[in-house]
Image: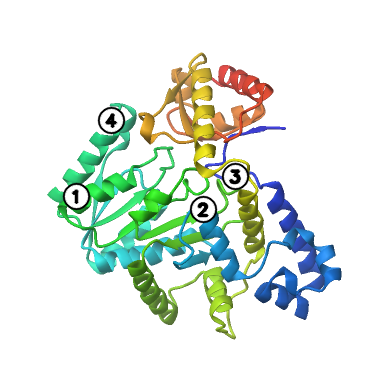
Amino acid sequence: MSLYLDTARLGQMCPESQRADRDFARLAGEEAGSLYYDFLLRAGFLSLPPTLRRLYPGLRGWSGVRSLKKHVQLALGFSSKRQLYLASRTAQLVRLASRVLCRQCENILVTDMLWPAYRRILEEESRRCGRVVTTVPLRAAIFDERMTLSDLVGRLADAYGRENCDGLFLSAVTYHGIRMPVAEISQAASQVRRPGFVVIDAAQAVNHVPLHATARHSDFMIAGCHKWLRAYHPMGFGFCCRSSAEELMADSFSEMLQSGDVDDPLLRFSWELETGACEPFSETVNLAPLFTVTAAVERIWHSRLGRHEKHASQLANTDQVADLAKHTPWRPVRPTGPMRSGILLLRAKRSETRSASPEAVRFAFRRRGVTLSAYDGGLVRASIPPLSLPARGLDRLRAALNRCA
């Protein structure tokens, strides 16, 4: 079996979600169109008769959209009193958040580490509304100049004041594995000018790093279930972190519904299930994510490790892999301590590897039983699990690093 270190791109489906997926596929094949199918979607697993409950035990955690939202919020450390949006694609939630951000703010501060697709959506909305997006370059300073956390916060606060910014769109953990000090940045910005709205990309953070403190300093947080949550089927989460954000998001969502700008079938469908509304000509929806997420969240409740213990274990494992890599033709590329996460970057020391295509590098590792992400310039990204890697896994990784150089 391959050593899978690519969770930052797509997590391996956890066993609980696999069982839910299989049983939902069987239910869809045997009961689709029946009243029992409708009962299940709206009222939950217990609405099924005992004979069907015995046939599809992998769906036992499902108890409706409202219950799912509450369980997701509580399991991931968010307030269950706030609104949570579910969507087939996080991009739709980014557009909704960007629309509110551009209505509330005139100049939005971002860094050069924001996910490029999200940045494009923000720039589209900012052009439409006549707003400005100010970008602060940080990545090179963090990796090459070993920028400290306080220096990072100071640089962003300086830019925020100098450029007259009044909004923030930041990553909780960047796709290169940098854990951003969102709380400290938001507090420093507020000393200059209170942000009109703060949006956080938590795609790489949910079920990876604790987010409670980050949520206290955010208005809206966007994440998904197919990476560190390991539910596999893509589904986006949009967490309202403040009551004021709920009103702003609800107003924009209503306007987008009326104008037809909401082109996400799950976002519409989950809203219909929760509110009781019914659209006669709605789009067909892939419902499988609802059940695989339910099972993945249930897995969190039964985990022997709490969020903080899990993160501490993950950092210890990442340190172990970084130390291992130092004795191979690869060099760890890491930020300073407080900004580290369970994502580890490694750069090839040899020029031949640095000039190879990312596809060739990734394929070379896969041939040797290690799955990870690869980028231009001989850079690879490994997602380290919270449980200790077995000795044979470390031996396989060491061999792959030595042979894929």
* Residue type, numbered disc 4: Met
Label drawn at residue 76: 2
Q: Label 1, on which residue? A: 160
Q: Nearer the viewer, residue 297 or 261?
A: 297
Q: Residues within 10 Å of mark 2 (few under 14, many from 20)?
A: many
Q: Nearer the viewer, residue 34 or 331?
A: 34
Quarter of the figure with the N terminus = top right
Give the residue drawn at x 28%, y 38%.
Answer: 138
Give the residue drawn at x 69%, y 71%.
Answer: 44
How far apart are labels 2 and 1 at the CA level? Answer: 30 Å
* Residue type, numbered disc 3: Gly
Report x, y in % for residue 351.
Answer: 44, 19
Q: Nearer the viewer, residue 147 or 375?
A: 147
Q: Is residue 179 left or right of residue 162?
A: right
Q: Label 3, on which residue? A: 11
Q: Nearer the viewer, residue 172 or 137?
A: 172
Give the residue drawn at x 72%, y 77%.
Answer: 39
Q: Is residue 211 above or below residue 79?
A: above
Which badge, 3 or 2, comes first in the chain's sequence? 3
Which badge, 4 or 2, comes first in the chain's sequence? 2
Q: Residues within 10 Å of mark 4 (few under 14, many from 20)?
A: some
Res. 381 visible in picture: no
